């Protein structure tokens, strides 16, 4: 199995035409305007070991500097403007606006970081860096709240400004009106309100309003109509479609999106409600509950980096997805057995299994998009994976909250232990013990634990459903030719062993 080169000369001369001029590399370190066709022999069979088949990439040192800048950006800079607004917020409305700005920044920097990496790092060594992407996200989610990120983020900003050079647009010279005309404004006008209606219906249904209330019914109807409108726009306006049909018809893209949405939803369901369990059932503070989830985050980091290293060596990412959908449901299922008397050794070990499983599969959807799609379609594929990961998380956090509220209220009414369900529901997890009489506390903790476990059951179901995404992925190698139908077929196990041995040599 031949490896793609990690660097190419500054200029490449075609071997088939002595009169052809050298191809000069753009001054941008993350240039996306490489003419791939001009670097490929039109009449010869594709040879993965031939450097003329590969696009130009920056030298190794420059790649490392670019990736450090991108990782710093993911860790800090996406939150800068939002942090400034939140820090200076005089009221809750300003905080909400700041959070919205943070969400926009985070979405742009995550997808943009991967797109920059696509144009900076060759595909065959990209999995190792993808592992660091997931690891950085996991570490930042734990230590981020403990860092005053606003001044530190200036370091990332400076590195990005001075290292990353502007990339010439693929279609230069367009006026603002022409650029706007290329946007899928009608599709977005359907998609965004549709998602908002769905989230509101899931958040309010069964708690603020009954499920049969006209408000909830109207929200679900609006969601369905707007979602259908979005699909129709994508079908009948393909030139400006947000989601091109050619991309979503790809088998690995469909499987990768399913894998991404189930893993992302599982992760967020557990990371949101595990701290609640620690605060309410174990009586820890908010800070301590975050510390108690570190075993899961560290295992997630190890899984991300480990899967990237394995993929970089053997070339295949599907095997890591298989391992993920085996380990992740086991860890999630064990967490559903939590009781008020669960020992620290148990909740640490169960979190390690869950985090390792999530980490092994977290980046495989993105790797599939970068491998099976043509290079020009990779940004769309990566953005779709990010969309489903975040949308799934948002939807299932609302579903989880609804399940928790409904089960807690119904159990309190059924058990009739003399406590007001609405008061308990509105009491924060950290204040639960001080808000009820001591003689009612043991019974309340059992009911509260049962309600949180229902959320963990939902997370386990999502973890099990991820198996359909894993088995749907094609066995494509990052060391083969990128694009539809360009990958290598899956080798026999002994062949993979030989490849690993050759890598070590």
Image (spheres, helix red, strand yellow):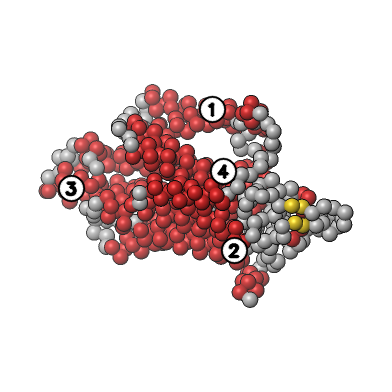
- The residue singled out by tag 1 in the image is 189
Mark 3 or mark 2, earlier in chain: 2
Check disc 4: other Cα within 10 Å, few if <14, some if 14-19, many if 20+: many
Measure the C-alpha gap from mark 3 to mark 4. Answer: 44 Å
Q: Quadrant of the C terminus?
A: bottom right
Along the viewing direction, whichever of 317 and 255 lies nearer the viewer: 317
Contact flag, marks 1 and 4 (Cβ < 8 Å): no
- The residue singled out by tag 2 in the image is 312
Vertical side of 291 occupied by 196: above or below: above
Q: Residue drawn at (61%, 44%), measured in percent from left and top?
A: 166
| Tally of numbered tags | 4
Q: Quadrant of the N terminus?
A: bottom right
Relative placement, left or right, of 314 versus 103 is right
Relative placement, left or right, of 191 versus 399 is right
- The residue singled out by tag 3 in the image is 433
Q: Residue drawn at (46%, 44%), measured in percent from left and top?
A: 78
Measure the C-alpha gap from mark 1 to mark 2. Answer: 40 Å
Vertical side of 444 occupied by 14: above or below: below
In the rendered image, which quarter is residue 376 located in?
top right
Mark 3 or mark 4, earlier in chain: 4
In the rendered image, which quarter is residue 245 located in?
top right
Along the viewing direction, whichever of 386 and 132 lies nearer the viewer: 132
Mark 1 or mark 2, earlier in chain: 1
SS for callout 3 = helix
Contact flag, marks 1 and 2 (Cβ < 8 Å): no
- The residue singled out by tag 4 in the image is 383
Given this view, does label 3 or label 4 mark the residue nearer the observer? 4
Image coordinates of residue 163 in percent, x first then y, are 56, 51
Measure the C-alpha gap from mark 3 to mark 1. Answer: 46 Å
Image coordinates of residue 44 in percent, x first then y, are 83, 57
């Amino acid at each position: 199995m031949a490896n793609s080169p990690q660097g190419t000369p500054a200029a490449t001369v075609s071997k088939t035409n002595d009169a052809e001029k050298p191809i000069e590399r753009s001054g941008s370190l993350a240039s996306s305007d490489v003419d791939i066709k001009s670097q490929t022999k039109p009449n010869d069979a594709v040879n993965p070991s031939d450097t003329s088949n590969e696009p130009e990439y920056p030298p190794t040192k420059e790649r490392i500097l670019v990736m450090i800048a991108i990782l710093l950006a993911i860790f800090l800079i996406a939150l800068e403007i939002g942090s400034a607004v939140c820090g200076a917020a005089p009221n809750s409305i300003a905080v909400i606006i700041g959070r919205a700005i943070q969400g926009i920044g985070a979405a742009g920097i995550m997808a943009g970081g991967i797109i920059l990496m696509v144009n900076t790092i060759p595909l065959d060594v990209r999995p190792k860096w993808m592992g660091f992407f997931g690891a950085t996200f996991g570490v930042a989610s734990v230590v981020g709240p403990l860092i005053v990120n606003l001044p530190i983020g200036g370091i990332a900003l400076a590195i990005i400004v001075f290292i990353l050079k502007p990339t010439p647009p693929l279609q230069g010279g367009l006026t603002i009106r022409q650029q706007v005309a290329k946007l899928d404004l009608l599709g977005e006008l359907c998609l965004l309100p549709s998602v908002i209606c769905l989230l509101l219906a899931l958040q309010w249904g069964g708690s603020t309003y009954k499920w049969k209330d006209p408000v909830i019914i109207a929200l679900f109807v609006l969601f369905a109509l707007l979602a259908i409108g979005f699909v129709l726009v994508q079908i009948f306006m393909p030139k400006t479609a947000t989601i091109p049909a050619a991309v979503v018809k790809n088998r690995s893209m469909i499987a990768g999106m399913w894998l991404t949405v189930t893993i992302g939803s599982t992760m967020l369901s557990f990371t949101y409600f595990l701290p609640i369990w620690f605060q309410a059932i174990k009586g820890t503070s908010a800070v301590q509950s975050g510390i108690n989830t570190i075993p899961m985050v560290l295992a997630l980091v190890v899984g991300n980096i480990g899967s990237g290293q394995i993929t970089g060596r053997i070339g295949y990412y599907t095997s890591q997805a298989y391992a993920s959908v085996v380990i992740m449901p086991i860890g999630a299922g064990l967490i559903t057995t939590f009781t008020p008397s669960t020992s620290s050794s148990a909740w640490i070990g169960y979190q390690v299994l869950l985090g390792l499983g999530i980490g092994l599969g977290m980046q495989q959807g993105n790797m599939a998009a970068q491998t099976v799609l043509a290079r020009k379609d990779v940004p769309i594929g990566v953005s779709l994976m990010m969309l489903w990961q975040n949308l799934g998380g948002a939807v299932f956090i609302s579903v989880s909250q609804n399940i928790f509220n409904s089960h807690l209220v119904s159990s309190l009414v059924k058990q009739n232990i003399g406590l007001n369900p609405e008061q308990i529901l509105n009491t924060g997890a950290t204040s639960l013990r001080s808000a009820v009489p001591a003689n009612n506390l043991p019974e309340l903790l059992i009911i509260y634990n049962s309600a949180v476990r229902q959320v963990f059951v939902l997370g386990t179901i999502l973890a099990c459903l991820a198996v359909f995404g894993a088995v749907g992925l094609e066995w494509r190698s990052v060391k083969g030719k990128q694009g539809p139908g360009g990958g290598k077929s899956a080798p026999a196990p002994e062949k993979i062993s030989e490849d690993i041995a050759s890598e070590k040599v």
